[in-house]
Image (tube, rainbow, N blue to C red):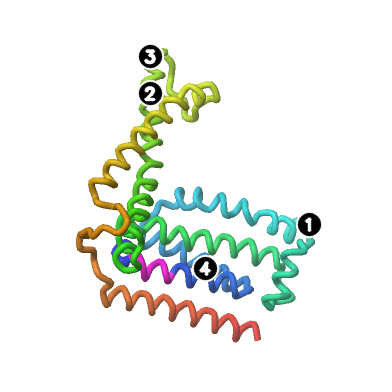
Amino acid sequence: MLKTFHPLPKLALCLAWIGASLVVFRLSFQIALFAAAMLLLLVDARIPPRRLLLLMVPFALFGFGFFTTSILFRAEAGFAVQMAQEQGGAPDVAPGLVLFFRVLACGMTSAVFVLTTDPGQFVRALMQHLRLSPSLGFALMQAMHMVPDLRAEMLQLRMARAIRLGGTLRRFPVPGEVISLAIPLLAYAIRRATRAALSFEARGLQPGRPRSNLPQPPIRRADWTLLFLGLGVLAATAAIMSIQAA
């Protein structure tokens, strides 16, 4: 369902969920958003649990300071207390704990969009529906393809180097190996940039020139239904949490 969801309504829904997480200072609300995002990734997108745990690590580390301060040391950071006062946090809930789950909820909601959206389709939808500049759109697509291609090129260079030196391929390159790979990777990036510039010229991406576009999938009625259903669930959850807090 999520992978067939049009990128623009999906982006609007994810931004609405993140905005609600930043506004509502309730621990139960943050846990509900976090659990909903995890459930969508596990059941609908079929992301392996191990990969989800690895994705959670940077977000958990970002909010781990608030968690340890609140739970282990029984104290609160000044920023957490100020946020709780400004956003009407419950007095019986540690503000640091709310901020910790807020980071996880926002991070996994963004993961829902990133892991279920084709980057090329998203950029083309921006170009068609939101009038994104074609030169900027194709530059974004080139950048998105450049990162995995650089990784694949680095792996090939490491394999060739290991075969030439008669050694074993380590899981992570040592500093000396990284330095030796810097120049070949730079040369590869320059070649890719030159080819990208030539392809830009071939596609007629000069500003002010008329150009044609391949037809893109329109926003269907099912996409609008999913958008309003997600917004309705979000509004109902926020209302229930507010009533319980009152």
Q: Is residue 12 magenta?
A: yes
Q: Is residue 228 above or below residue 198?
A: below
- Looking at the image, which residue is at 32% across and 42% down? 197
Residue 2 appears in the rendering: no
Q: Are marks 2 and 4 in contact (CB under 8 Å)?
A: no
Q: Secondary structure at mark 2?
A: helix
> In terms of depth relative to the viewer, which is nearer, 137 or 235?
137
Q: Is residue 106 magenta?
A: no
Q: Which mark is residue 73?
A: 1
Mark 2 or 4, nearer chain start = 4
Question: Disc 1 vs disc 4: which is toward the camera?
Answer: 4
**Residue identified by numbered label 4:** 18
Image location of residue 161, percent across then percent down: 40, 19
Residue bounds of the magenta highlight: 7-13
- Looking at the image, which residue is at 61% across and 83% down? 244
Q: Secondary structure at mark 1?
A: loop
Q: Is residue 188 above or below residue 75?
A: above
Mark 1 or 3, nearer chain start = 1
Image location of residue 193, percent across then percent down: 36, 38
- Looking at the image, which residue is at 29% across and 65% down? 128
> In terms of depth relative to the viewer, which is nearer, 47 or 156?
156
Question: Disc 1 vs disc 2: which is toward the camera?
Answer: 2
66 relative to 49 in the view: left or right: right
Mark 3 or 4, nearer chain start = 4
Q: Secondary structure at mark 3?
A: helix
Q: Would you call the spot at circle 2 few (<14 residues within 10 Å), some (14-19), or many (20 or more)? A: some
Mark 3 or 2, nearer chain start = 2
Task: Give the alpha-carbon distance from disc 2 to disc 4, as whole Å.
Answer: 42 Å
**Residue identified by numbered label 3:** 164
Asked which quadrant contains residue 92, the reply is bottom right
**Residue identified by numbered label 2:** 159
